[in-house]
Amino acid sequence: MIHRSSREHSTEPLALDVEGLTVTYGKEPALWNADVRLGRGALAAVVGPNGAGKSTLLKAALGVVPRVSGRVRVLGEDPARRRRLVAYVPQRTSVDWDFPTTVLDVVMMGTYGRLGWFRRPGRNERALALGALEQMELADLAGRQISELSGGQQQRVFLARALVQDAEVYFMDEPFAGVDAVTEQSIASLLGHLAQRGKTILSVHHDLATVPRYFEHAVLLNRAVQAVGTVKEVFHRGNLDRLYGGRVPADVPEFAST
Amino acid sequence: MIEFWTLAIAAVTALACALSGTFLVLKREALVSEGLAHAVLPGIVIAFALTGNRTSPLLLVGAAAMGLVMILAVQAIRRTGVVDPTASLGVVFPALFSVGVLLTSLELAGTHFHADCIIEGNLALAPLDRLELGGRDLGPRAFWSVSAALLLVSCFLLLLFKELKLLTFDGELASSLGFRPGRVHVAWLAVVSFTVVASFEAAGSILVVALMIAPAASAVLWVNDVRHVLGLAAVLALASAFAGHHLGLVMDIAPAGPMATSAGVLFLVSLALAPRGILMKGRARRRALAQMEVDLVAARLEPGQPRDWESVRGELGWTTKRFGGAVSRAVSGSAVVHDTGARTLHLSPGQAQR
């Protein structure tokens, strides 16, 4: 049987292609008709005021919350069919850190997707998890109870878990929240390394002052996407004033809009 | 022989309840067991009215399905956000329970189900109700139904331990990895509901809740790994069953009460003595404070430069007793040298680097 090529091979598919994504939890839409397109290796911050639907954008793109409408493609594929293409770093506070388990065990959860149903993690998965812990400079905490971790350590454990997934696109919900300056630097350089290796990152970020330093792209979101582009193009005072209703603190670096 | 069967039923019930209750405790939804223990009663009665046969295995399945539907309905009500979560439990389950009690007295007057058995169960009489197949006596029916529950719970845990752990710790990750946490959770609740129904007749509503929650709630205070929590909860549940059964014999009362009491006592002991219990936490805090006091004293001293005892005490603003205690601890730890004649203090030479 001869296939006529129905796909365009001349252009590489976008790493992340979100089209018309709409989500609601009640009367008001939490996310309205959002379009986000990112090429491979994009390092993008999602910024916007509280309740702008930043986490919802990630969760809806992942299929964790149901969408009213919209379509998501990761490298041209439906992520619901190719789960291994995406990794997710939830908000640190979304889980119970008193859960009786160890750091290594939490990181090994990143291998569960590859294992699939019923199969248990073994030596291989253990080695992968230890490698990721090493990369996050957490190797000596492998056997530690997760309840004994500091906030920055918890965040790095979550990132190690995402590294184990070895995905193409990483969704991160506030990876910089509540970490000290040293940890912030190590997380920033990790994101940079991932992007250099062609991985694509979409990360909710609250600190406007560090957006230009840590990210190359920005998604300005207030239920609807107000702008997507490189930080240079879209992350300027005019857009931010519009996004936050003129309440942007003065310490946010200015960018020429041209 | 009757005693043997009573103990066997008690032990298997305790195991099935403890294993199924562990993930409820870990998921911080222990109240679900309370809810189920109430909700299955109308289920049992209605399933009985429909099948007209108290010994049918369909009764167990029907009642378990009913319990599951009730739990899901309550969770749906909670998700609407219209009713306060705790209020929805408080409103729905007692109502269901009272419907069950009402139906019991209407439908089943003169049968096995008496309202007083609902609370306390009927463990003492359970061995007399035999399961017969083709004229052969296979032992008490209750033993087989709780064994079926234990088998079901064990199989689920063996097959889906990884999935259950993941959805309990991080449902969003489970969902993003395609593990369908909603469906796995409902399947697990179905198993829990079956366990509650199977244990209900022998154990009664209070004991079911006690056996589901107390062993796991105790175990998490001792050990730090989900597998170990499951194992220790099983051991504690068995201990409660044996102790309760023995107490019941000695005191000549129904075993259900002493079993629940034993589970409660084991929890209190754990709460007091376990590494994550109250006493150890308090002791750890007192030790840390004592060490901090020693460090504070040492920080005000230099080696070879004696300082007046009283002026150091004044700087710290401590009572004589507190300061004296800190100094004597510092001296016995050879951090500080106390010249009792001159009433002066100085740092031990070895401590200079600290």
Image (spheres, coloured by chain):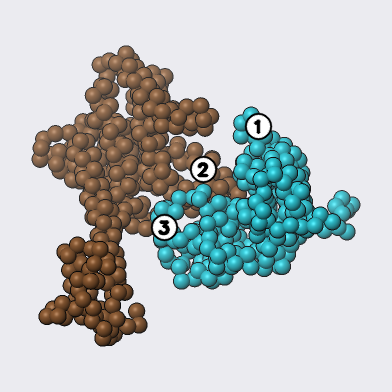
Give the left or right position of residue B302, taking residue B71 as reference.
left
Give the left or right position of residue A244, taking residue A230 as reference.
left
Residue under label 2: B184
Q: What amino acid does circle 1 point to?
A: Glu
Residue at image position (31%, 53%) is B221
Is any part of residue A92 visible from this angle? yes
Chain letter, cyan: A
Marks 3 and 2 in Cβ contact (< 8 Å) = no
Q: CA distance from mark 1 to mark 2?
A: 30 Å
**Disc on res. B186:** none
Where does residue B116 sit, x and y in percent of width and height? 23, 24
Residue at image position (67%, 53%) is A250
User: In front: B17, or B27?
Assistant: B27
Marks 1 and 2 in Cβ contact (< 8 Å) = no
Chain identifier of the residue bearing label 3 in the image: A
At mark 1, the secondary structure is loop
Where does residue B299 sit, x and y in percent of width and height? 31, 74
**Disc on res. A28:** 1
Residue under label 3: A147
Crowding at dot 2, Cα within 10 Å, few <14 / some 14-19 / many 20+, comes out as some
* Closer mark to the observer between disc 3 and disc 1: 1
Residue that lies at the very extreme toward the top in this rendered image: B106
Where does residue B298 sit, x and y in percent of width and height? 28, 75
Chain letter, brown: B
Where does residue A144 sit, x and y in percent of width and height? 42, 64
